[in-house]
Amino acid sequence: MFGLFNSDPTKKLQKEYERKLEQAMHAARNGDMRANASLTEEAEALRAEIEKHKKK
């Protein structure tokens, strides 16, 4: 009954993942490859976390 009001942690992680990828894309377009690599690495860590939640 009260499960309806619980938020899904994967949705929040998915939004953060997409935001990081977009930031990485903008960094690459601006020529900042270090920021691109860093943001992509953070996004991949979030993707791994999402996959871990999906397996539960």
Image (cartoon, rainbow, N blue to C red):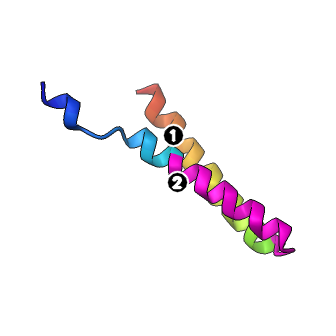
Which residue range is magenta in the image? Answer: 15-33
Q: Main secondary structure of the magenta part?
A: helix
On the picture, is 51 further left or further right than 30? left
Eyeballing the image, is 8 above or below 37?
Answer: above
Label 2 vs label 1, nearer the camera: 2
On the picture, is 20 further left or further right than 53? right
**Residue at 52% from the left image edge and 54% from the top image edge:** 16
Query: Alpha-carbon distance for marks 2 and 1?
Result: 10 Å
User: Residue 19 magenta-drawn?
Assistant: yes
Disc marking residue 8: none
Residue that label 1 marks:
50
User: Residue 23 magenta-drawn?
Assistant: yes
Residue that label 2 marks:
16
Residue 6 lies, in percent from the top left, at: 24, 38
Residue 42 lies, in percent from the top left, at: 62, 59
- Which quarter of the image is occupied by the C terminus? top left
Foreground: 31 or 52?
31
**Residue at 53% from the left image edge and 35% from the top image edge:** 51
On the picture, is 27 further left or further right than 47? right
Foreground: 25 or 48?
25
